[in-house]
Image (tube, grey):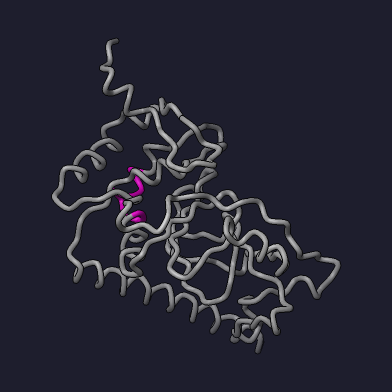
Amino acid sequence: MMCSFTAIKKTILESHVDDSLYDKFHIFEPEFHQSIYVEPCDNIACQTGAFQVYDPIRSICYPYRGAQPAYADDENDVATLDYEGMMTDEGVRLDCDENKRNVCALKSNCIRNGFIDTSLARSVSRNFYEKKKKKVAVYKNDVLVNSTGDGTIGRVAVYNYDFPAVVDGHITILRYKNEVLAWYVAAFLLSVNGQRQMYRYINGSSGQVEIYPQDIARVWVVPKSESEMSVIAELFKNACEKHDQFYGDLKLALSKV
């Protein structure tokens, strides 16, 4: 069966990150060529105003993954289990305790479909955070994409907290100059067309699946007007804040039983 040089060339990924571990990857998974996953890419790419997840004008940096944290929590030492931002049984998030409290460490299972479950987080020391934050820290309005594992890959959420946090190497960070755009892109990635495009670039099998940052970077995003993006972003953000309030209220209610 003959295939064109152009078709083969499209499967070779070039890294845009100087110190990246990912040089080139040849995508030959069946999904890459299946129309259900190809059509969203092609149809959106030809729309006026369409842009990719990584856009030099809109993005602060190229998508990248976090790194394996040096966890500070020890179940035999209760004092190490607390971290800034941890939800107490009374539904209140802990403060930094004059920068003595550990920092939140998000694992891949913390990234849900549209929200972050901090109850599953672990922690790292302040010292680790300060030394490694350039690589692993996340900031408010960062878009987080779960990049590995059957059942979890492709989950997307926006970091909507003011307290510091880090992410592990299974999570890809997308960072934009515009807050509204960040929330809109996250919403799009959770949509059918966003999910199908990401699924097209998944590598691996038998549960060992992943999607690389440079694959997420080339997903095409449906163009919307500024006002339309603002409406979507506000609805999404409000939903996340309601979920967080629900979690706090639930913790408080259960503490009174």
The residue at the point 43 percent across, 60 percent down is: 143
Q: Is residue 78 above or below residue 213?
A: below
What is the magenta range?
Answer: 189-197
Q: Nearer the viewer, residue 176 or 252?
A: 176
Report if residue 195 lies within the magenta region: yes
- Observer-nearest of 50 and 154: 50
Image coordinates of residue 141 in percent, x first then y, are 43, 68
Residue ranking furthest to the left: 48
Q: Position of residue 113 (x, y in %)?
A: 44, 59
54 inside magenta stretch: no
- In the rendered image, residue 176, in percent from the top left (x then y), is placed at 38, 61
Which residue does the image show at 81% across and 65% down from the upper left? 75
- Is 125 on the left or on the right of 178, as rendered? right
Look at 69% across and 66% down and name the residue there. Answer: 123
Q: Main secondary structure of the magenta part?
A: helix
The outermost residue toward the top is: 1
Name the foreground residue: 10 vs 112. Answer: 10
Quadrant of the frame with the C terminus = bottom right
Q: Nearer the viewer, residue 34 or 225?
A: 225
Image mark count:
0
Q: Quadrant of the N terminus?
A: top left
Q: Residue at x 40, y 37 (%)?
A: 201
